[in-house]
């Protein structure tokens, strides 16, 4: 698209209260059968409408048709037993009961393709779709078959590539892989994480993105952030690898974080999806606060490569808070966009 500083949302938006429990991550559905399918599509229509009217340029599904950004995809794969559960440490932060890999993992049929077709048919704006990244998928399971995080990641990468190619054929403009695990398992990122990510994106003509954040605004994540000190420098190790990768867009957390802004310089040449909206606080950013974050980022990324966004998904927020934050994102972006347009050289 030709819009300068096109805005987007990283991942989830709150679901309507008639579809799932409000302000709750991974809440069970309130509907069943055909009513659930209709309800998901209605929620998707609302998400598209709200993004559009609040000035979001690259729209997404807001994850309205899935409960969890990782396991909803895994539910559709063979080789994973959701009845046989184990407790594992997720991203070295909190314990969770997860399904078990019991055999070779396979994608028997498309997972999100029909939902993506519905999204494409409902808006004429550029659309973005999110998928879990291979490393983060591995970290959300108990592996009782491959006995190797790397081997399982490569299997998932091939499966994700199948799904991504069909999403591209359905009209998706940007395919984003969510890899919060990249901020934790830094040695694995270097050894095989980036390579597995590139395998997931292999052969795509659609733009590709990887989202690496410090997590939803839940207690386990905020407690972990409190241990990271006055500067969060995890990106310093991963950005050079990603700058040399085939991935087009790098999505990162910035607003109200302790990430040094100058680390963005390590991505020079890539597009940067900058988190200018905090997802750990219900305080609504002012347009000027958003604009100030973008101005600081523009010292290290060219304007034609900056995509203002949120730090992470906003599913746990009250809907009015999330929507107000979308409005703040677009209003703050307009301020900087107009400043850039005024300062651009006049062509005679």
Image (cartoon, grey):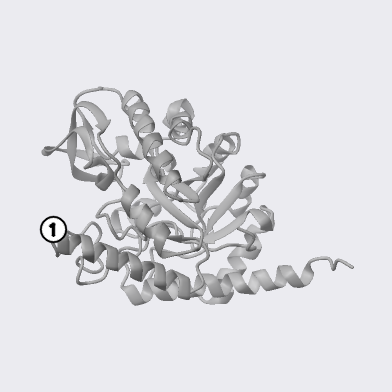
Which of the 4 image quarters holds residue 236?
top right
Q: Is residue 303 above or below residue 71?
A: below
Direction right: furthest residue: 348
Q: Is residue 284 above or below residue 306?
A: below
Q: Is residue 223 above or below residue 109?
A: below
Residue 21 location, x and y as percent? 19, 67
Q: What residue sits 52% from the left and 38% below the top?
A: 238
Per the image, the residue denoted by label 1 is 33
Q: What residue sits 35% from the left and 40% below the top?
A: 136
Residue 127 location, x and y as percent? 47, 57
Q: Is residue 264 among the parts visible in the rendering? A: yes
Q: What residue sits 32% from the left and 63% below the top?
A: 315
Picture quarter with the N terminus: bottom right
Front-most of residues 185 and 105: 105
Q: Helix or strand or loop: what does disc 1 sit on?
A: helix
Which of the 4 image quarters holds residue 303?
bottom right
Residue 17 location, x and y as percent? 22, 72
Q: Is residue 283 among the parts visible in the rendering? A: no
Residue 39 falls left or right of residue 246? left
Residue 274 location, x and y as percent? 54, 57
Front-most of residues 102 and 61: 61
Picture quarter with the C terminus: bottom right
Mark 1 nearby-residue class (10 Å; few <14, some 14–19, many ≥20) = few
Q: Is residue 49 above or below residue 307?
A: below
């Amino acid at each position: 698209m030709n819009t300068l500083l096109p805005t987007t949302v990283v991942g989830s938006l709150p679901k309507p209260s008639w579809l799932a429990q409000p302000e709750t991550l991974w809440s069970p559905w309130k509907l069943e059968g055909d009513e659930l399918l209709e309800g998901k599509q209605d929620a998707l229509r609302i998400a598209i409408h709200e993004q559009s009217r609040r000035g979001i340029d690259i729209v997404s599904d807001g994850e309205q048709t899935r409960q969890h950004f990782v396991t909803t995809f895994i539910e559709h794969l063979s080789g994973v037993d959701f009845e046989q559960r184990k407790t594992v440490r997720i991203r070295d932060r909190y314990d969770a009961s997860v399904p078990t890999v019991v055999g070779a993992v396979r994608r028997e049929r498309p997972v999100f393709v029909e939902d993506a077709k519905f999204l494409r048919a409902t808006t004429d704006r550029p659309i973005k779709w999110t998928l879990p990244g291979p490393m983060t998928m591995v970290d959300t399971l108990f592996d009782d078959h491959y006995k190797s995080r790397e081997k399982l990641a490569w299997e998932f990468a091939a499966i994700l590539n199948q799904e991504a190619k069909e999403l591209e054929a359905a009209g998706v403009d940007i395919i984003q892989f969510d890899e919060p695990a990249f901020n934790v398992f830094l040695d694995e990122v270097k050894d095989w994480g980036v390579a597995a990510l590139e395998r997931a994106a292999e052969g795509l003509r659609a733009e590709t993105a990887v989202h690496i954040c410090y997590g939803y605004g839940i207690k386990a994540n905020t407690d972990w952030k409190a241990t990271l000190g006055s500067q969060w420098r995890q990106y310093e190790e991963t950005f050079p690898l990603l700058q040399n990768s085939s991935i087009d867009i790098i999505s990162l957390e910035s607003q109200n974080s302790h990430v040094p802004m100058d680390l963005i310089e390590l991505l020079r040449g890539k597009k940067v999806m900058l988190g200018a909206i905090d997802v750990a606080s219900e305080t609504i950013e002012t347009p000027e606060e958003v604009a100030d974050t973008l101005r600081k980022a523009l010292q290290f990324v060219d304007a034609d490569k900056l995509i203002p966004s949120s730090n992470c998904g906003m599913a746990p927020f009250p809907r009015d808070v999330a929507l107000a934050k979308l409005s703040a994102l677009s209003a703050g972006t307009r301020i900087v966009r107009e400043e850039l347009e005024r300062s651009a050289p006049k062509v005679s």
